Image: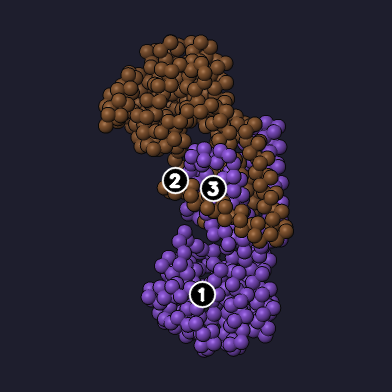
Chain colours: A purple, B brown
Amino acid sequence: MLQSSKLNDLVCMLNKIVIFGVGLIGGSVASALKQTAHPPFIVGVGRHQTSLDQALALGLIDQVETDIASAIKDTDLVLIATPVAQTQSVLKSIKPYLTEHTVITDAGSTKSDVMADADAILGAFKSQFVGGHPIAGAEKSGPEAAFAELYVGKNIILTPEDHTSHSAIQTVTALWQACGGLISCMSAQTHDRIFAAVSHLPHLLAFALVDNLSKRPNADLLFKFAASGFRDFTRIAGSHPEMWRDIALANQAALLEELDSYQQAIMTLSDLLKLSDAEGLYQLFKHASLARTDWAKTKSE
Amino acid sequence: MLQSSKLNDLVCMLNKIVIFGVGLIGGSVASALKQTAHPPFIVGVGRHQTSLDQALALGLIDQVETDIASAIKDTDLVLIATPVAQTQSVLKSIKPYLTEHTVITDAGSTKSDVMADADAILGAFKSQFVGGHPIAGAEKSGPEAAFAELYVGKNIILTPEDHTSHSAIQTVTALWQACGGLISCMSAQTHDRIFAAVSHLPHLLAFALVDNLSKRPNADLLFKFAASGFRDFTRIAGSHPEMWRDIALANQAALLEELDSYQQAIMTLSDLLKLSDAEGLYQLFKHASLARTDWAKTKSE
């Protein structure tokens, strides 16, 4: 309870925040903040008037603003929760209106590119930018999909740099803790290498499998008999193509290393199978199966 | 209703059946048959006394039998639902007691190896063997996991050969239709090529990813931040290592072809990424995403 009220104290220092993109990610932050003891005034900005109107109607935000100058005026914190390809233009659009009190953060899936953009665009204000990546999502998108509990118990990664202001890090930490998130700090490079391995690579592998099978002359027959294993393995191949194009390109170097490493792993497996190495296959499957089972226990799936 | 009562007529021609392996697969067949109008007398045979006792206590089977001669005597149908590596020894053990009226079938995940074993072992009785593969499963195993509805609406593949008796095919078709299954017939080779692509390959790919990541010095960090995409993609890496070693070896040729084809697919994707070919990546992801979404609609997941 003590910690909880301290969080509310921290968050209540935010009188006004601006959220660019009021979909699942930004809308859920808004929804969580609205449940704190002293919710800030929340302004929504975005490309889609319908989404903004919905967010307003749902009570996620207090105001829709199309004029960036008015939106940013007297704002304590700007959260960029748009698709990552728009981060650069949002940073450029807000730059003229920032003051030394405005903290800026984002929720993008890649971080090296965002940190480089912030450094290049924000000038003296770059110390007030704290990169962020909430490891949370849901099947649905848009403001109607937003909910206050999305981030409860979920990892939130922040990627401050040496020049980042300590108070900006504290503000962004408090923001996510108020949403129930668990904060980890690391470099943008470390972040991008981790997510190349555990997220971006699996997405590309799933896309590659479905693309490969769907282009075969007997694709209909294959899909007819594909069952639950295929369903789980390929679920992420149903993801948004534009978003994943942007993520792949933004994390190109780390992802190419992962693809190389995975090709080696497939080669090893192929060789074991070619040699009918029953013991080698068994050991590899057993090691993977134990590791997967242990991992699942930590995630209480 | 007409069709349903016809099915019951067919199944009620079975007075006695023997099931080798009374776990999820065999137990669920037993459970479904017990719900038909005229259930057969069901004898359970297996390596694990505990499982057999449980199946008896649950009412899935009517009798546990350790003597193969007694089990097979006057039996209309033998269902082999053991792990696939035991099929050969089960066929050898029942061979001396078969009559020209005994129909034999199995539920193994690979079919070319089973058909070859049946041809080699059963002699004149090979025409009474109909290979089968129910495309159904569940997270749990053992007789307690068995349930009558496991096969309702699920694909059941039969792999009869030119020499297979028409009445044996009819009997096995009736068996699975009584369980609610949807029957497809194809050659064992076609079956194995299809399942190499849509099931065996994904399993190996998931095993390979988890094995690769779990052996890295920073494995703990990687697993800490792995989230729902990783969870779905790698769920099948938690599968039974012994079973998958056997499946991989049993379907070696088709699976090696699939691994080759997939390596080409990964190479194509890597090249697009190396060249920063945004349009090429987008088209590949979009094609896969649409195919996956269309597929999911047909499976009403």
Q: Residues within 10 Å of mark 3 (few under 14, many from 20)?
A: many
In which chain is the residue bearing label 3? Answer: A
Q: Which residue matches tag 2?
A: B298
Where disc 3 sits, the SS reads: helix
Residue A194, percent from left and from top: 64, 60
- Residue B282 in sight here: yes
Residue B220: percent from left, percent from top: 62, 56
Residue at mark 1: A47
Query: Gap in Å between the C-alphas at discs 1 and 2?
Result: 34 Å
Q: Earlier in the sequence, mark 1 or mark 3?
A: 1
Q: Amino acid at mark 3?
A: Phe
Subunit that carries the residue with mark 2: B
Kind of residue at disc 1? Arg
Q: Which mark is residue B273?
A: none
- Residue at 42% from the left image edge and 15% from the top image edge: B102
**Image coordinates for residue B218, horizontal then vertical, percent:** 66, 57
**Residue B256 falls in which quadrant of the image?**
top right
State the residue in front, B250 or B146.
Answer: B250
- Split into 4 quadrants, where in the image is the N terminus of chain A? bottom left
Q: Amino acid at mark 2?
A: Thr
Q: Secondary structure at mark 2?
A: helix
